Amino acid sequence: MAGTIQKLAVQIVRFVEEDATCWVECQLVDAAGHHHKIIDKVPMFTGEHLDGVSKYPQEGQVYCKVLARRTDEHGRDLVRVKTVRPTFVESTAGISEFLVRAGDLTELTDEELKWVAGARR
């Protein structure tokens, strides 16, 4: 449903740097197969503790707002999402809106829904 917040699957591919918080690089693959690089703090993608000695790649996710859903000419269920709500995450190219496969999205848990409601205020 348009306007809902969901989680979009990403691959955490490498450790970038450590300061007060560890930074990692993620790959998001859109419906056309294009790879988008996102670099941010570990908690933006996972609740796991990751650092320079962790094994990569690892599964991750990023919160996104569903903008629209459609089925393409090949019968694939596609979703246009924006990753800057409720958190501000964008690709290294400055892109925050992506067309992705519906199967790459998951619903939020009750705890996550409460967090999102608080973040929207």
Image (cartoon, rainbow, N blue to C red):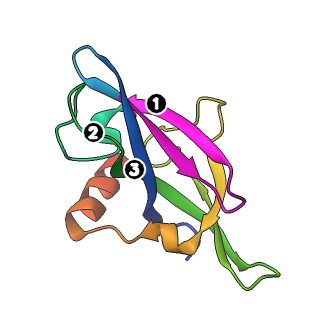
Query: Is residue 9 located in the magenta-colored stretch of the structure?
Result: no
Q: Residues within 10 Å of mark 3 (few under 14, many from 20)?
A: few
Cα separation, mark 1 vs mark 3, equals 23 Å
List the residue tagged with mark 1: 39
List the residue tagged with mark 3: 120
Q: Are the residues flagged by discs 2 and 1 in contact, CB closer than 8 Å? A: no
Q: Is residue 73 left or right of residue 78?
A: right
List the residue tagged with mark 2: 43
**Mark closer to the observer (1, 3):** 1
Cα separation, mark 2 vs mark 3, equals 18 Å
Q: Is residue 102 above or below residue 17?
A: below
Which of 119 and 112 lies nearest the eye of the viewer?
Answer: 112
Whole-percent x and y of residue 42? 30, 35
Residue stretch rendered in magenta on the structure: 24-40
The furthest residue to the right: 73
Assign a secondary structure to mark 1: strand
Which of pointers 2 and 3 lies earlier in the amino acid sequence?
2
Q: Residues within 10 Å of mark 2 (few under 14, many from 20)?
A: some
Please name the predominant secondary structure of the magenta segment in the image.
strand
Q: Is residue 110 left or right of residue 13?
A: left
Whole-percent x and y of residue 87? 43, 42
Work out whether residue 4 can be spotted: no
Q: Residues within 10 Å of mark 1 (few under 14, many from 20)?
A: many
Which of pointers 1 and 3 lies earlier in the amino acid sequence?
1
| Three-letter amino acid code at the position of disc 3 | Arg
Q: Is residue 35 above or below residue 105?
A: above
